[in-house]
Amino acid sequence: MKAEDAPESALTDGVASESIADETRTFRFTGEFTAFSVDGKARVRVDGEPFDVDAFPHNTLEISPNGTVEYDVSASGAVSVDKDTIDRPNARTATGRARETHVVSYAGELTYFELDGDATIRRNGSRIDSSDVLPSTRPHEFKATARSSREAYTVETTRNVDESVAPHGTSGAARFTGRTVRRYAGQVTAVEHPNGVRVEIDDDRNQIVARAPGDAGARVSVETTNGLVVDHEAYDVADLSVSAGESVTAVPFGDLERIVIDDLSVQLSRNEYPSAEKSTTLQAAAKVERTDAFQRLVDIASGRVRYDAAGIAGQEVRSGDTTTVRSVEHELADPGQGDSAVLSVRQTPRGIEHASVLYKHFERNEQVTIDAVILPVGPTVDKLRRESETMTVSRSESEPATPDVEYTAELFAETANPDKQVKPSDLGDLEARLTPEDVRTQGFLSFLNDVKDLLTDIGADAYDAAKRLWGVFKGHMDQVAVTAQNIVISSPYLIAGLADDLPWKEQWAPKLIWRIAMAPAVTLVSLASNGFFEALDTGAGCAFCVFFAVVLRDIIVSEVTSAACVYFIAALPAAVVCAVVAEALTQFISQYFGYRDVKDDLCNGDVISEIDPC
């Protein structure tokens, strides 16, 4: 809370309190009220609307027990109960035992509800089931229709589907007949027709696989926001014919929108209910707040913990290979040390996995120091651990620095002109294709200084390096499609596959391997424009030569060009920077390797003496 038209003395630790007469006070705040009282007569407006102080909090939850029950409830705003026998751990929480009706009044939305015993529940006067007390945490929706079959079809998700009947006790699998509309959380992992034909979505491998049983085939249609690749061909909508006992694989781009299996149609709408994501975070935070680890963090933290919705952030993260956990951060107001601070807790179904207080100190030289006080959560650790790390930040002070460039951009349908030698500067403004989230670029100047080292590393080991990379690259050709003048590549998955397969433990050309593993799709555009894919038809030897020459040239150009574009976006017109850097580097490297038309020179026997791999 901040005083806008009020003296600063009216605020103490987030609480506004003052005596006024014939005056108006204005405060700005985030979250929900945890208390509101006026002693005397006054008109109160919140966001311009009249506010009834006497009726605050404005929502009610009525618990009418059948016998004796115990309950625990919390909300994003104030909570009060019409009985004096309940416990109030804080302004947002109430716990107690009831033999008669208790009315819980609250502001905002409910974030936690646990009931031990049988009771009739009413929210704002309407009877509801105890499982529906909390807001839904399912942000997505699917609409499914089976026009002719009366048998049940199945939709499987990674988390849960509302009002589902789970076959074989499997959480997240729902069976329906006819037409249905359901909300769900997580990802859809499979759709199965009553005839046994399944469409499986594997996000980890970036694949959609349609499988038919041995006694039935089907027509399958799959649609995504940015198209699909099937057998090296790109489609806006993939119409697949799956024979009995066979399977067909597609590589999707963007979000899955529609799956059709014969008469069954499933339409998917992601983030149809955006408020559900915030409810998920608030409910996860309420669970974390009830753990001993969180209470210990509160005791050792230097600052006032924020429990309002605007002060809580959360996200799903991976722990190991499969476990999805919820990471929750509570911001500290008025931290006693550092410029900002948070309590960070990561919880799995098995318990607390990580708990720490993080203090951030922002320096004038674009550096940030993070001091972490880490709580022991393992069975063998019995004392607090302190760690400190200093890193360079971007101009927005929002992203940590790394000495290299990490590409996670998805570039779809890049144009490659076969009649022209394509240079990186011909590909347009990289800023239009790569967002700050796609490319994290810091330490740019030190990176430029490493280019000379990279050329040295190529040296005499270049031929062996290219041979090994060629073998790796061939194994991932299913991620690339060429249709007419379009080249389609899912960069995150191709790059991840290349990185996994590269011989990292061997000590040859380490910087070369790292750079090529991180190459964006620009290199593949150059491969296409230099006749690489036609060379595949000519023979493996010719294709290898083209691959070798183009990669060695473009890997440096594309990497440094991309780094320059993103790094200087805030200071200079990105198109100018891209053009200047690309032109200079292209000219330098072309002179270094000494060639112009890669395919014609290499495949017609006019081998370049500077490279000489063929």
Image (tube, rainbow, N blue to C red):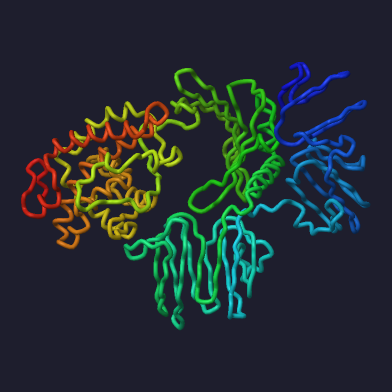
List x then y, in percent, for residue 177: 63, 75
Quadrant in which the N terminus is drawn? top right
Figure disc tally = 0
Looking at the image, residue 519 lies above or below residue 392 = below
Looking at the image, residue 82 lies above or below residue 99 = above
Looking at the image, residue 118 lies above or below residue 287 = below
**Front one among 44 and 371:** 44
List x then y, in percent, for residue 330: 64, 35
Q: Is residue 581 left or right of residue 568?
A: left
- Give the residue drawn at x 62%, y 39%: 313
- Give the residue drawn at x 66%, y 52%: 137
Looking at the image, residue 563 lies above or below residue 10 = below
Q: Is residue 106 left or right of residue 611?
A: right
Q: Is residue 252 left or right of residue 158?
A: left
- Give the residue drawn at x 19%, y 54%: 531
Quadrant in which residue 149 is drawn: bottom right
Quadrant in which residue 142 is drawn: bottom right
List x then y, in percent, for residue 580: 27, 31
**Front one among 606 and 202:** 606
List x then y, in percent, for residue 369: 50, 24
- Give the residue drawn at x 43%, y 26%: 392
